[in-house]
Image: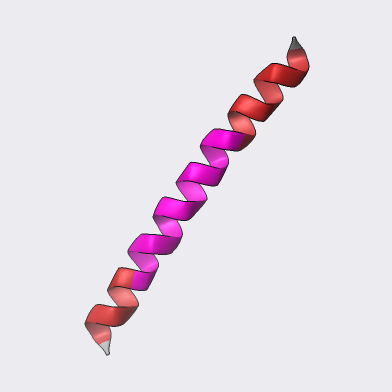
Amino acid sequence: MANQEMSKRNFQDEKLNQETFLSHQAQYLRDC
């Protein structure tokens, strides 16, 4: 049960990291 919670949180973190990465990339492309 706790394991499921962990993977769910990890999944959310992954998504957040991806969104952050994409926004940084977009910012970088805009600055160039």
The quadrant of the picture occupied by the N terminus is: top right
Extreme residue toward the top, this view = 1
Picture mark count = 0
Q: Is residue 14 above or below residue 29?
A: above
Q: How is the image coloured?
A: secondary structure
Looking at the rendering, which quadrant does residue 31 occupy? bottom left
Q: Which residues are magenta?
A: 11-25
Q: Position of residue 5 (x, y in %)?
A: 66, 19
Extreme residue toward the left, this view = 30
The quadrant of the picture occupied by the C terminus is: bottom left
Q: Position of residue 30 (x, y in %)?
A: 23, 80
Q: Is residue 30 above or below residue 6?
A: below
Instruction: Give the overall secondary structure of the magenta segment.
Output: helix
Q: Is residue 5 above or below residue 19?
A: above
Looking at the rendering, which quadrant does residue 28 occupy? bottom left
**Residue under the image location 37 percent in, 71 percent down:** 25
Looking at the rendering, which quadrant does residue 8 occupy? top right
- For residue 20, side relative to residue 8 (left or right): left
**Residue under the image location 52 percent in, 35 percent down:** 12
- For residue 30, side relative to residue 22 (left or right): left
- For residue 28, side relative to residue 17 (left or right): left
Q: Position of residue 2 (x, y in %)?
A: 75, 14
Q: Position of residue 24 (x, y in %)?
A: 38, 68
**Residue under the image location 55 percent in, 45 percent down:** 14
- For residue 17, side relative to residue 19 (left or right): right
Q: Is residue 9 magenta?
A: no
